């Protein structure tokens, strides 16, 4: 299974019992290294899901390769421009944790995707991810510095620029997400809320209230498309 995201390419190798036995990840520029690392494996089936359509791998075009698109995902009411990564993560979460389910994907973009008990898309939201928020502040202002994302939740009220940037982004980010979670729980009190993506562990460490973190949702979704 190969998932090509906005920033990284991730791969998961499954055995015949549909268990993940190996995982790999690289940035786009290191694709050739990933291909070299896996080129000696004789894969019976290959599935690729990509949100970056101009990236081609050595596995594209092979007879055993399936290119998964949003229209292939067996959920109802998905719209044509919805990212296949969102659709697959939602499918994977629903199949593992049950429906209804809300998926928060905390990557380069942060997305929320809600699926009801009948596997219909309720709706969702898209906003710049945590790292993108910090990068945007630095790149689009003349005086604000580049700052790191803090490991621990910073204080809400700051007395210097760096702390003000860290605290402002962190608390407003968390508050917005928690508002979506609270609204979803009011509509679907029996729903599981599952988080995935590169910043998911950090957001949970900061106190975001979710039921589970699972970095492999997209791969489980791909499994259920075959």
Image (spheres, rainbow, N blue to C red):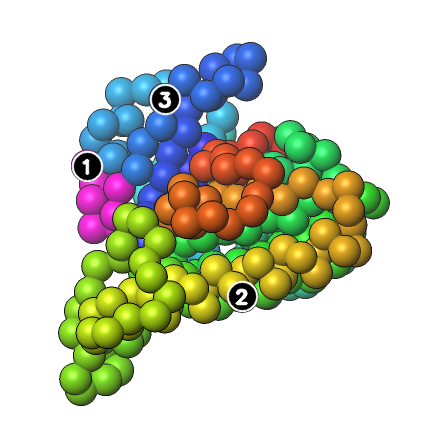
Give the answer, above or below, for where 190 lies relative to 171.
Answer: above
Kindly report the distance in space between the C-alpha atoms of the residues bearing marks 2 and 3. 35 Å
User: Is 160 left, or right, of 198 in this rendering?
Assistant: left
Q: Residues within 10 Å of mark 1 (few under 14, many from 20)?
A: few
- Residue at the (27%, 20%) spot, across then down: 40
User: Is 220 left, or right, of 154 in this rendering?
Assistant: right
Q: Which residues are magenta?
A: 26-33
Q: Which residue is mark 2?
A: 176
Kindly report the distance in space between the C-alpha atoms of the residues bearing marks 1 and 2. 39 Å
Q: In the image, which is nearer the foreground, mark 2 or mark 3?
A: 2
For the stretch drawn in magenta, the main secondary structure is helix
Give x and y (percent) for residue 32. 21, 41
- Residue at the (64%, 30%) spot, across then down: 96
Q: Nearer the viewer, residue 45 or 87?
A: 87
User: Is 169 left, or right, of 180 in this rendering?
Assistant: left
Asked if residue 18 lies in the magenta stretch, the reply is no
Q: Secondary structure at mark 3?
A: strand
Q: Residues within 10 Å of mark 2 (few under 14, many from 20)?
A: few
Q: Secondary structure at mark 2?
A: helix
Q: Nearer the viewer, residue 91 or 98?
A: 98
Disc marking residue 22:
3
Give x and y (percent) for residue 84. 55, 52
Q: Choose the circle earlier in sequence order: 2 or 3.
A: 3
Q: In the image, which is nearer the foreground, mark 1 or mark 2?
A: 2
Q: Which residue is mark 1?
A: 33
- Residue at the (37%, 66%) spot, across then down: 156
Q: Nearer the viewer, residue 170 or 22?
A: 170
Give x and y (percent) for residue 121. 73, 55
One can see residue 34 in this view = yes
Q: In the image, which is nearer the foreground, mark 1 or mark 3?
A: 3
């Amino acid at each position: 299974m190969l998932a090509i995201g906005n920033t990284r390419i991730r791969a998961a190798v499954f055995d015949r019992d549909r268990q993940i036995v190996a995982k790999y990840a690289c940035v786009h520029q290191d694709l050739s290294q990933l291909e070299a690392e896996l080129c000696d494996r004789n894969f019976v089936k290959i599935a690729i899901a990509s949100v970056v359509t101009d990236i081609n791998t050595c596995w594209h075009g092979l007879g055993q390769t399936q290119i998964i698109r949003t229209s292939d995902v067996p959920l109802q009411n998905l719209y044509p421009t919805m990212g296949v990564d969102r659709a697959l993560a939602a499918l994977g979460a629903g199949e593992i944790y049950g429906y209804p389910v809300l998926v928060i994907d905390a990557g380069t973009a942060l997305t929320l995707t809600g699926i009801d008990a009948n596997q219909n898309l309720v709706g969702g939201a898209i906003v710049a991810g945590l790292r993108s928020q910090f990068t945007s502040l630095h790149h689009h202002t003349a005086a604000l510095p580049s700052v790191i994302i803090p490991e621990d939740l910073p204080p809400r009220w700051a007395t210097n620029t760096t702390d003000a940037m860290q605290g402002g982004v962190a608390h407003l980010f968390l508050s917005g997400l928690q508002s979506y979670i609270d609204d979803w729980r009011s509509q679907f009190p029996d729903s599981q809320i599952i988080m995935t993506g590169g910043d998911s562990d950090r957001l949970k460490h900061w106190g975001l209230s979710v039921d589970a973190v699972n970095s492999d949702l997209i791969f489980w979704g791909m499994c259920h498309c075959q």
